[in-house]
Image (cartoon, grey):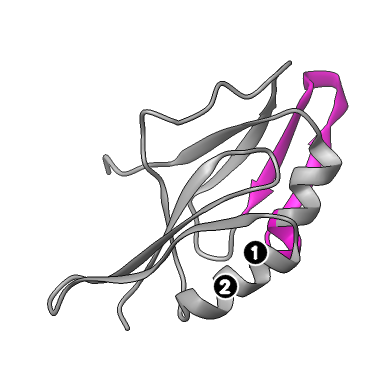
Amino acid sequence: MHGFCHIELPCTDFAKIGKFYTDVFGWNVREIPEMNYAMFQTPDGPDGGFSKQAKIAGEPGIALYIEVEDIDAILKKIEEAGGKAVHPKTAISPDFGFFGIFTDVEGNSIGLWSKN
């Protein structure tokens, strides 16, 4: 019981980042105005939130990866939704699958991972 239970991403615009993650991954995003915060729910967890910031600092010190079935298809959806694919699908090793990296509409760098 020591796994991640909540992920928090910085943003400057709740509507913009909420639409992006809903369009690309199907996450449910709900703004909580009294907390200046928005929560997101993923199909299999962990869930998390978006913390409103005056500006995004840049490259994160922590790498987060979202498990997907098809990295290439998701990178295409990311581009269509206003994000940017910054590293294409790349093999890690025969035993450890593949990864890709994108930046969302707020500039957060996030990884994708798949078995195939």
Q: Identify residue type, mark 1.
A: Ile
Q: Quarter of the image containing the C terminus? A: bottom left
What label sits on residue 74 in the rendered view?
2
Q: Residue at x 13, y 79 (%)?
A: 94
Q: Residue at x 64, y 64 (%)?
A: 78
Q: Quarter of the image containing the N terminus? A: top left
Corner quadrant of residue 32 = top right
| Percent x, y of residue 74 | 57, 72
Q: Tag 1's secondary structure?
A: helix
Is residue 86 in sight in this rendering?
Answer: yes
Q: Name the residue carrying label 1.
A: 78
Is residue 26 in sight in this rendering?
Answer: no
Q: Residue at x 80, y 54 (%)?
A: 19
* Magenta span includes 34: yes
| Percent x, y of residue 105 | 70, 46
Q: Quick check: 81 left or right of 97?
A: right
Q: Is residue 114 above or below residue 33?
A: below
Q: Residue at x 41, y 46 (%)?
A: 64
Circles 2 and 1, Cβ within 8 Å, touching? The answer is yes
Residue found at the far top of this picture: 54
Corner quadrant of residue 5 = top left
Q: Nearer the viewer, residue 6 or 85?
A: 85
Report, in whole angstroms, how far the alpha carbon at label 2 lies from the one at label 1: 6 Å
- Which region shows up in magenta? 21-41
Q: Nearer the viewer, residue 36 or 87?
A: 87
Q: Is residue 33 above or below residue 47?
A: above
